[in-house]
Every structure is written in C-alpha cells, then in structure tokens.
Amino acid sequence: MVARVIVVDAFDIVVFGATGDLAARKLIPALFHRDEAGQIPQRARIIGASRRHLSDNEYRDLARGWLETHVEAEDRRDGAVPRFLGRLGYVPVQADGDDGWEDLAAALADQPDRVRVFYLATSPDLFGPICGRIGRFGLATANARVVVEKPIGKSLASATEVNDAIGAVFPEERVYRIDHYLGKETVQNLMALRFANSLFEPLWNSAHIDHVQITVAETLGVEGRAGYYDTAGALRDMVQNHMLQLLCLVAMEPPTSLAADAVRDEKLKVLKALVRLTPETAAEQTVRGQYRAGASAGGPVKGYLEELGAPSSRTETFVALKAQIANWRWAGVPFYLRSGKRLASRVSEIVVSFRPIPHSVFDGGAGPIGTNRLVIRLQPNEGVKLWLMIKDPGPGGMRLQHVPLDMSFASVFNVRNPDAYERLLMDVVRGNQTLFMRRDEVEAAWTWIDPILDAWGASTDGPRGYTSGTWGPSAAIALIERDGRTWYEEDAD
Ligand code: BG6
C-alpha cells in the first residue's frame, strides 16, 4: 500500500534551537521524510536559528550528519539528501537578546504573505522572549504561526504566564502546542476505531466497561536529560500531557466533526470532569517511584541518583495512579495510568477491560472465563487486539480459551510508520489544529495535576525505590490489586 501525499503550500519554517537535540533527532529528519515523499514544494525554506555562529553550509553539514544517524539508509535515496539540504539556511539569532533579529527579518522579507512557521524547540523560558521579539521585529505576519513544545509551565500558574506571553503576540488560532503523542499513528487510530465503527460506541460506557488502563513504559533512563528531568519528573513529563491526552481520547464524547475545536471542546470536558485529588486521596490513589541500579535493555544500568550525580532527589521517574471521571458515561469506571523509565519493557498501550459476563452457562470443566479486552498497542508492534473467549477446538467437551483477535498494523499495511512529527509539522503548515492542545486544555490538565504535586510536596515520604528492569514499585501493583484487578501483561491472559 502506498501512502497518499498531498503537497502543501510553499512555506518558510524558522526553527529556534536549530542545533539542539529535538532538531537533530526529530525535526530535521521529519522535514526530510516529507520532502523525500514529495510533500514539500520546491520553494519552501527551512531556516535554522540559534545562538551559535554558523554559515548556511556549516549548518547543512550538521544536518547531513543528523540524517545519517536518524534516517534509515534505505530512505535516503539518491539525490534526496542534497536536494533537502539545499533548502536549509541558517541565521545566528540570540533568543534572549536582539542580536541577529534584523538578519532573520531580512531573510524572510521577500515572502511576507507565505505561511510562516516559528518552531520553538528551545527551553520554555525562552518562549516569551522569542515571541516578544517576533512581534517587535515585525515578523508576526498574518500567516505566521508558532509551535511550542512541552513542558508548558511547571504548574497552572507558570503555564498561564507562558501562555500569556505567547498570546500577547499570537492569537490562539495561530498557536500550535505540540503533544507528539497526538501525532502517533495509533493514537489517531483510536479515533478511527471509536468513531468509524458502530460496534464499540454502544458499549463504551460504565454499563459495559469495567476499567481502563493506560501504560507508557520505557526502558530508557533519563539519557543525558537529567538537568531538565530532575526539575520535572514523570507526572509533569508524561502524565500532565501525553497520558491525559490519551485518557481524553478514550473518554471523550463523540465530537460532531474532526474540526479542531469540536475535538478540543470534548477533550476539555473530560479534563474538567476528572475528580480532583485531595492529600488523602492522593496518598491512596497515586504511587511514585525512582529507579535504582539494575538491568535494563540487556545490560547493567545505574540508578537515577547516580546518573544525576546527586546524593538525593525526590524526583519521581515512575508514577501510577487511579483517575476517576465524574460524568454519566464514566462514573465508577477507574482509569489506571502508569508510566516510568527503566521499566521491564518498552510498551505503550491502552487496555479497555469489559465487564465480566453476568452468568455462566458452562460447568467448571470449561475453565475460567476471562473478560473481553480491547488492547490498543501504541508502540512498538502497533496494532489492536480484542480478547475473546472461544471453544477449545476438538472433541472432549466444552473447554474454553481466551484468545486475541489480533491485528498488527505492520502486517496489514506494508508502509513505513511515519514519525509523529511528520504529520504534526505538515498540519501546522496546513493550519489544522485538531492534533494540538488548546490553551484551556493545558490549563485544565494542570488544574488536575497541581493538587497531586502539592500533596507529594507536603508528604514526608519520597518516591519509592524500584530496581531498574522491573515494573516499578510493588505499591503500583497493590494500587490496582486492591480493587480486585491486575495490570495487563501481554500474553498473560
Ligand atoms: C517526551 C518525554 O515527551 O516523551 C520523554 O519528555 C519521553 O521523557 C518521551 O521519553 C517518550 O516519547 P516516545 O515517543 O518515545 O514514547
């Protein structure tokens, strides 16, 4: 199957933080892939901007190296790399000072009407200063838009400040807050599954669903990002954004269309319906952990504190929690969320567990009757599984088995799975905000997260240690088992 490509209008994109990790690993490779696929018109320009003094050619050399590292050799077809590098330019610009801004304005001046994208792949402290200068130097043309990365703030108060600074220059309909999980193919598939099939929606409520689990587990540690990570922790880094967005897509009412505000209005209602935790309920319904030395991804690994090079830190690298949504559809259906670094395997999945059958017509010899579960595997091995009970084949009476109806996307669609950034960058150029977070969503998510942070901050207990390569602290297992349920494990059923 060949993916369909619709060429976008010519655009200029200015990447601030152009020599940083995100540009190297994600943005430049994503733009290359879209160019290689023929989606980016000839006249489009990609301009790197950062404080380093580089010429256009020096920046192209850097980008060539990134493509060699981050793009598979088979995707770097003859001529594609030089053609792409030819689109790149570079302007040294000081984000928190005025140096270089006139040069940037001059580089863009000949195309004032074009779609102009400012991508802020920088520390969030610079969002305000950069937006301020984009405004002051007259770069915020009618067709200009800004893309910002998480984290947007560290709390509701700081997120409001960041959003105010951005909003002083760009109206909301030109602000694109990236949550790269929304760009993942399987996450969008969740919407296809729910709203392009009539099968699930009648069952999608507390009458039929027992609980929902969302797991985003990584085997990696903090990988040289300890400076940032130690000021954030798993709750801010993963739950406030990615995991709450997944929860919203599972729990929201069907939007009237996929128009950006139709979808975002529904997600916002879910965030507002989340039951706020108190210090008491936070102690019961949340678990935080921090990895210790152990074995992960095939070898021995250091503990978090050793990686950090600090004798102590209360930053959590793991969180598990039970969330409740107070509305008609979901009352009484817990959503169990867990995410952590240095866990037993890399897996992101959503598990929708249906209620047990009300009465069994089978005798004991049939064996236990497992529950139906819909498992949406976000990564790796993207796909969907529906666990059903069937009869064990052959004579010998009625014995039952729990088996999955298994659809692996790799075997159904024989195409490269595009990186989330490819889709999202093209959506910015097209002006489609559906997969981006609106200001009020980000702020509603912080409104729910802040009391948990406060409760943790006030508690004398720190995060519980867990050995790298395990599934986190045992308290996380107890959190769900107390309710008579277990964390889903692939093939454990
Ligand atoms: C980022 C977090 O947003 O998502 C990282 O800051 C995390 O800590 C990453 O590793 C996970 O993304 P993915 O796409 O690898 O699941």
Image (tube, rainbow, N blue to C red):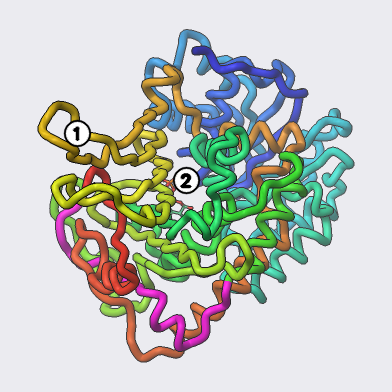
Q: Residues within 10 Å of mark 2 (few under 14, many from 20)?
A: few
Is disc 1 placed on a helix, strand or loop? loop
- Residue carrying label 1: 392
Q: Callout 1, which amino acid?
A: Asp
Residue 442 spot, x, y in % from top left: 65, 62
Q: Callout 2, which amino acid?
A: Asp
In depth, the one of 365 and 74 nearer the eye is 365
Q: Residue at x 40, y 50 (%)?
A: 351
Is the residue under label 2 in contact with that under label 1 (CB below 8 Å)? no
Residue 176 spot, x, y in % from top left: 70, 48
Q: Residue at x 76, y 43 (%)?
A: 256
Q: Is residue 102 above or below residue 321?
A: above
Q: Residues within 10 Å of mark 1 (few under 14, many from 20)?
A: some
* Count of residue discs: 2
- Residue carrying label 2: 21
Q: Is residue 145 on the magenta stretch? A: no
Magenta stretch, residue numbers: 275-296
Is disc 2 placed on a helix, strand or loop? helix
Q: Residue at x 72, y 60 (%)?
A: 439
